[in-house]
Each structure stands twice: as structure tokens, then as C-alpha cells.
Image (cartoon, rainbow, N blue to C red):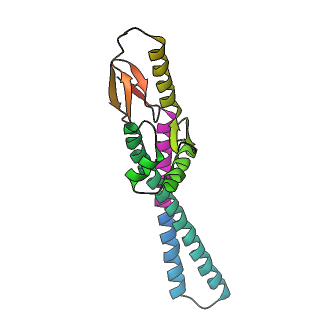
């Protein structure tokens, strides 16, 4: 299992835990605070307990919203991979236009995804304003070297486009060979 696939799966599990436990904890604390407020005897201890329940409810809902942020990033990752498979240059401007957000938001999202290991061996090139995936760069360099080394017509191996079952990205693989997804590193059959 590739590093990226594991990172996305772990993030999805954490997201589910955050959303379920956060909402459950927050709702339980709100309910407890409301019951205590209705059946109170105006003691100082009850007032402190009510305040603490509201604080715990806020923390529960904060955890819930962290889970929603994870879910949003996971879904954005799939959009980004789909766009990057069509635009091998990795332009942040094209990602921003496809997702309907600004380039700054795309940079922030990509930094989060790189930090969480959704993209393996990737970095943001600030000068060229693009996402660089090292696996795609290595393939491009290898193809350039092969074409420069041969002056005569040598039949090029036939490439086929393969869709990754893990992330949905499109990668070009030599027909009949086994390769890696350019985006998540999962094995692909050409």
C-alpha cells in the first residue's frame, strides 16, 4: 500500500472519529447544560458546572469542525488529482480555476495535503507557481534523456493511460508493464 493511500485512509478514519465523537460529545454537553439550567437551585457549584458543560460542548463542536475540515481536504485532494492528471505542469492557476477558489487558497490546501502526506515527494514551486511532483519530473527527465541520446528512429514503447483506483489520477504507463501512480504511488498495470 502506498504512502499516500495510507495517509488518505488514516485521515479518513480520523475524520470520521472527529466528526462522530465531536458532535456526540458536544450535543451531550449541551443537553446536560440545558437540563442543569432548567433544574437548578442557584448554587455556585451548579453555575460552575453549567459553565464547564458549555465549554466542553464548544470543545466537542470544535473537534467536529476539525473533522469537517479533514473531509473537505480529502475531497479537494481528489479534485486536485483529477486536474493534475490532465495538467502535468501542475499549475496552481488551473487548480484555482477548476475549484473556483483563489491561488492562495489552493496553496494553503496543497501545503496541508503535502504536510499530511496526501502527495508523496511533492513541493510547491513558488517562482513557477506550480505543484511539483517528483515522480512526474523524473519520468519527464528520463523521456528527455532517451530522446536526446538516440539520433535514429527507435520505436518508442507504447504508453497507455491508467486511472488509479486509489486516488483517481491518470498516469501514463508502458503497455504491459507495472508502474506507479504519479500522485499517490499505488501500483498500476499498464
Instruction: Tell me: residue 80, above or below residue 186.
Output: below
Compared with 17, 173 (above or below) is above
Q: In this view, does 44 lie above or below 138?
A: below
Q: Position of residue 36 (x, y in %)?
A: 54, 83
Count of marks placed on residues: 0
Quadrant assignment, res 80: top left
- Would you say residue 181 sits in the magenta stretch? no
**Nearest to the observer: residue 61 or residue 113:** 113
Q: Where residue 89 sits in the image (x, y, percent)?
A: 45, 37
Hey, which residue is sitting farthest bottom in the picture? 42
Residue displayed at 47% across by 16% down: 148
Residue 187, quarter of the rendered image: top left
Residue at point 65%, 81% (across, down)? 48
Q: Say which quadrant the C terminus sits in.
A: top left
- Can residue 8 be found in the magenta stretch? yes
Residue lying farthest to the right in this orientation: 44
Residue 110 x/y as whole percent: 52, 48
143 and 40: which one is in front? 143
Q: Which residue is drawn at 54% across and 85% down?
A: 37
Residue 16: horizontal and vertical position, in percent?
46, 54
Q: Residue furthest front?
A: 151
- What is the chief secondary structure element of the magenta stretch? helix
User: 90 or 61, which lies in front?
Assistant: 90
User: Start and end of the magenta stretch?
Assistant: 1-21
Residue drawn at point x = 51 percent, y = 69 percent: 26
Amino acid at each position: 500500500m502506498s504512502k499516500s493511500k495510507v495517509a488518505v485512509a488514516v485521515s479518513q478514519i480520523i475524520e470520521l472519529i472527529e466528526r462522530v465523537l465531536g458532535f456526540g460529545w458536544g450535543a451531550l454537553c449541551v443537553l446536560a447544560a440545558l437540563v442543569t439550567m432548567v433544574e437548578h437551585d442557584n448554587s455556585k457549584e451548579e453555575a460552575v458546572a453549567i459553565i464547564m458543560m458549555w465549554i466542553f460542548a464548544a470543545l466537542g463542536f470544535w473537534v467536529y469542525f476539525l473533522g469537517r475540515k479533514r473531509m473537505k481536504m480529502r475531497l479537494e485532494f481528489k479534485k486536485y488529482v483529477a486536474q493534475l492528471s490532465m495538467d502535468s505542469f501542475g499549475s496552481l492557476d488551473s487548480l484555482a480555476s477548476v475549484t473556483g477558489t483563489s491561488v492562495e487558497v489552493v496553496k494553503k490546501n496543497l501545503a496541508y495535503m503535502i504536510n499530511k502526506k496526501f502527495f508523496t515527494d511533492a513541493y510547491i514551486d513558488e517562482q513557477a507557481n506550480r505543484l511539483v511532483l517528483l515522480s512526474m519530473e523524473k519520468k519527464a527527465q528520463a523521456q528527455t534523456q532517451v530522446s536526446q541520446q538516440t539520433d535514429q528512429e527507435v520505436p518508442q514503447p507504447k504508453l497507455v493511460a491508467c486511472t488509479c483506483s486509489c486516488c483517481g489520477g491518470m498516469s501514463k504507463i508502458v503497455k504491459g508493464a507495472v508502474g506507479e501512480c504519479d500522485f499517490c504511488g499505488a501500483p498500476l498495470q499498464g
